[in-house]
Structure formats: structure tokens, C-alpha cells
Image (spheres, helix red, strand yellow):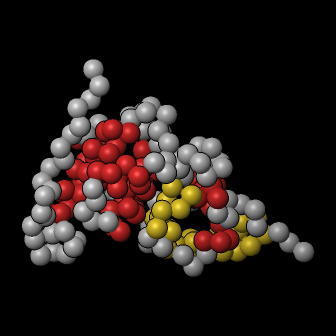
Amino acid sequence: MTDQHLITLTVNGADHELLVSARRTLVDAIRHDLRLTGTHVGCEHGVCGACTILVDGAPARACLMFAVQAEGRDIRTVESLGAPDDLSDLQTAFADNHGLQCGFCTPGFLMLAEGFLSENTSPSRDEIREAVSANLCRCTGYQTIVDAIEDCAARRCQSHGPAGDAAGGSCPGRTRPQHEPRPA
């Protein structure tokens, strides 16, 4: 009896055939087999969120899934957001609001935010804070990450309307983020 499984993973819109052991984690398959190294490995216990990706549009911890469990699912990694010379609006908001910090946790936060904003197109600041509490930033840069997500939501709302359609509607009560005062 073999422990190897031939699977097809759909990552960032491309199909990849892999021969993996039943115990190969999805994050290891993404990083080592597919060479998509934007997804980071932090705690390997699903606590820190550095390995957050989107599975069928919802944030998931890649360290807690086996690669064989992801067959037939739509997987998106941070590489799907944009390119170095063509950043997505979310990546731009992180850069503009200094939400990058040391950068280790950033891919996980970006994918968490991408999934969150697809579900909640006009979140309150408290809702953003609750969402980002799922991931850990060792630089304690949560303030700027919340600012970045709020900024991106406001920009998307301004350009696509609160329902996320292309109608370009108004966004009641939302323009640009109102930053909270930082401690002295």
C-alpha cells in the first residue's frame, strides 16, 4: 500500500498535478512543491495565521489542511493579488498605511483581509478589528493593518459602491479612514 497520492490542485487559477504523501500539508505543497513562497509558515498550529490563504473564497490556515483535502477546491495565495509592479488595491492600501511592518505576517493578513472584504464590503472599524484578531503580528502593527483594510474598503466602496458592483454608488458614512490617534 502506498502513501503517495496523485492530486490536482487549482492554485491562483492554474491546475497543478502533484504526487504527495497523505500527510503533506497544504502549506508545504504550496511553498515547496509549487514554489509559491509568499505564503509563510509561522506556528504550524493554526494560531498565527501567517499561512492564511483563500479556499473557495474563504480564509483558511494552509498549515492545518492536508494537500489531498484541497483537491477540487479553488485556492488563492498572496501571489494572486498582484505583481510587484502592479499591486492590488489591498496591497496598495497596506503600503500607503504602513501596514507591512516586517512583512512576515503580511501575506496572511492580506489574504485574511481579501476574504473578509469579499464578505463585508463596508465594514466598521470594530468589525475589521475583530477580523484581524484571527492573525498575529509580532511587530504589534495592528493599528496600521486596521487602517489599511479600512482604507481599502473605503476605496472599493468609492469605486464600486457599497454592494461591490460596478455601479459606482455612494458609500454612506464612509470616505477615507479616520485614523485613531496613536499613543505618544
Residue drawn where x is 48% and y is 62% of the image: 59
Q: Is residue 15 left or right of residue 112?
A: right
Residue 85 position, x and y percent, is 27, 49
Farthest front residue in view: 126
* Among the 4 quarters of the image, the one containing residue 166: bottom left
Residue at the far right in the pictured view: 1
Q: Is residue 147 toward the left or the right of residue 63 in the image? A: left
At 45% from the left and 48% from the top, the residue drawn is 133
Q: Looking at the image, which is closer to me, 109 or 91?
A: 109
Residue at the extreme bottom: 72
Q: Residue 62 at x, y = what percent?
A: 58, 58
Determine whether, in the image, residue 19 is placed left or right of residue 156: right
The answer, for residue 68, to whether it is visible in the render is yes
Observer-nearest of 145 and 33: 145
Q: Quadrant of the C terminus?
A: top left
User: Quarter holding the N terminus?
Assistant: bottom right
Farthest residue to the top: give it: 184
Horizontal and vertical percent position of residue 125: 29, 51
**Foreground of the two, 149 or 62:** 149
**Relative to 146, 61 lies left or right:** right
Q: Residue at x 15, y 49 (%)?
A: 176
On screen, residue 104 above or below 79: above
Relative image position of residue 91 (x, y in whole percent): 30, 50
- Residue drawn at the location 18% of the way across and 43% of the way down: 178
Can residue 14 be seen in this snapshot?
A: no
34 to 147, vertically: above or below: below
What number of labels is visible?
0
